[in-house]
Image: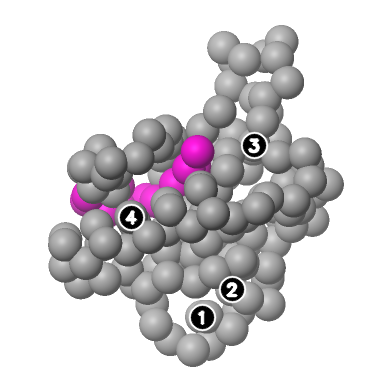
Amino acid sequence: MTDILYVEDNIDDADIFCRLIRKLNLPVSYTILNSGSEALDYLSNPPADHANQDVSLPKLLLLDLNLDGMSGIDVLEVIRAEERTRWLPIVAFSTSDNPKDIEQAYAAGINAYLVKPGSYQATGVMLQRLCEFWLNDNTRFGNQ
């Protein structure tokens, strides 16, 4: 099972995430996808190497909202409309601190909204706290 599914179309942000997650003293597995359509396909169709198994959803979807093509809000709305993914914990991870963007994300069903910090160190601290809460402390709902 993947702990974190991260949807991020900026290769630099994805690289920073990978480096920081590897530095954590937590056993975290992750998958990075670079588009909203890939994320929806991944969540609705198990990977080919797991086709004959009951594949669990990730423990957390970390979602950039400013994706090229299908926006993070569009992805969120589709996920919340599907029975299989309705209760999947989703955290927005965005550069935008615009109140309208934050309001729109919560209205679409986001569980939490994090603004990407400006420094490598601050991002590492945020990811550590994010993993500790969502992967360890949070009690999940449903058959996830």
Q: Are marks 4 and 2 in contact (CB under 8 Å)?
A: no
Mark 1: few, some, or many residues within 10 Å (few <14, many ≥20)?
A: some
Q: Amino acid at mark 4?
A: Gln
Which residue is identified by label 3? 57
Between the C-alphas of marks 2 and 1, the distance is: 6 Å
Which residue is identified by label 1? 101
Q: Are marks 1 and 3 in contact (CB under 8 Å)?
A: no
Mark 3: few, some, or many residues within 10 Å (few <14, many ≥20)?
A: many
Q: Is residue 12 magenta?
A: yes
Nearest-to-viewer mark from 1 and 3: 3
Q: Are marks 4 and 3 in contact (CB under 8 Å)?
A: no
Element type where label 2 sits in the image: helix
The image position of residue 75, as x and y in percent, is 61, 56
Which residue is identified by label 2? 105
Identity of the residue drawn at 70% across and 40% down: 144
Q: Amino acid at mark 2?
A: Ala
Which residue is identified by label 4? 128
Q: Amino acid at mark 3?
A: Leu
Q: Amino acid at mark 1?
A: Asp
Q: Which residue range is magenta in the image? A: 3-16
